[in-house]
Image (cartoon, helix red, strand yellow):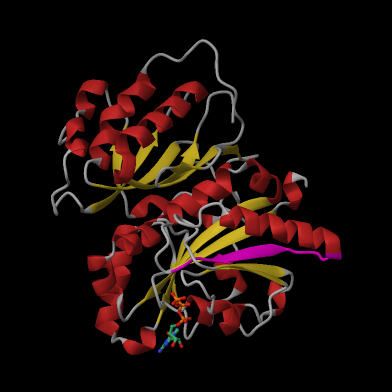
Amino acid sequence: MSEAARLPVTVLTGFLGAGKTTLLNFVLRHPQMDGTAIVINEYGEVGLDHHLVEAAPDDLQLIANGCICCTARGAMSEALLVLVARMRQRGVTLRRVIIETTGLAEPGPIVQELVAHPELLAHFELDSVVTLVDALNADETFASHDIAVQQITAADRLLLGKCDLVDEATLSALRERLREMNPDAPVAVVHHGAAQPAQLFSGGRDNPASPRYRSGGWLAAADTIRLMPAADAAPRGGLLGVARPLTPAEQQIETFSVILDAPLPWARVRGWLAFVRTLCGPTLLRVKGLLNIENQAGPSVVHGVQYALHPMRELPAWPDDDRRTRLVFITRGAGRDIVAATLGYLQAPALKEDPVPRR
Ligand SMILES: Nc1nc2c(ncn2[C@@H]2O[C@H](COP(=O)(O)OP(=O)(O)OP(=O)(O)O)[C@@H](O)[C@H]2O)c(=O)[nH]1
């Protein structure tokens, strides 16, 4: 299948009972959703959720008895490849796939499988991670379940459900909290699952037409770390901080941006990102942005969800006049310090030639 024909996949996540199936039922009835297959993942040995999907999708795969982020790892790839095989057998045209995760799924491993499995990459392209938030139970859920926090920070878009069950003040406090946790993700209210197709599929994470890649709102909420002489970029806490258990204060989620004016050598960027990912470990929740790479006409797009780093892709052109490298990080604990401390690596003299292949 050619790259242009790859099927967009959206991962619909959200904590237990957030309203994911309700939303699927609504959105699948939309005429624009013709040609949508769904993959539903459930914990129980006997799957139930697929019986609750009343609106018939064009194809359905159920993964019961395990979670695709851990105990049923690999089952998602199998299910997606079965869809491809069936599509060929029946001569059906599938246009997109929605994966409904269990409420306890970590998005990181799912994204990792989607972006790193060679056979899947030939047929599918991750469009978006969409997280449905239960407005009624959000505070309690975030306090007790780290997975719920990861579902928020991994999201490209956040949908707020059950808003009819909370008052205005609660809703506005929740919006503010979500903005702090993931400032780049647009937040929209959905009433009883009434989402629109465009809220699930946006044309892809690398879509240069996406407003997220234009200057302005994209970085507005994030503090900025500028690339400074290495001595000035000293860590606030020290690199070794990551090896000990994090204190509650360090659990604090931080968002910040890195803005670099000069074009960067490809090999150095690649090495730096791998280095940051390894050093940060679980303290890195999300990184996304545009890179200005030396001798390249368009920017390269970076997307990382926890330890899953998408293959970087060059866009044909810059979305606007701002040609600077702009990266937004969402970290916890020592993550910010690690990023700041390692920025100096990007300042080292450029390598004479790029010794590593680009992918
Ligand atoms: N009041 C209200 N109830 C909602 C809304 N959205 C969903 N619900 C209800 O929430 C309950 C759980 O919804 P589901 O769609 O089953 O949630 P889910 O996320 O698929 O649940 P799991 O698969 O168990 O994680 C159902 O009773 C829905 O009717 C909403 O916006 N308002």
- Which residue lies at the image location 34% right of the left edge and 78% below the top edge? 135
Q: Is residue 319 visible?
A: no
- Figure check: 296 above or below 353: below
- Figure check: 200 above or below 295: below
Viewer-proximal residue among 197 and 72: 72
Left or right for 298, reference 285: right
x then y, percent, for residue 359: 59, 31
Q: Is residue 239 visible?
A: yes
x then y, percent, for residue 145: 28, 65
x then y, percent, for residue 25: 59, 82
Viewer-proximal residue among 282 and 61: 61
Residue 151: in magenta span: no
Left or right for 31, reference 343: right
Ligand 1 quadrant?
bottom left
- Which residue lies at the image location 65% right of the left edge and 39% below the top edge? 316
Residue segment shown in magenta? 90-102
- Figure check: 118 above or below 261: below
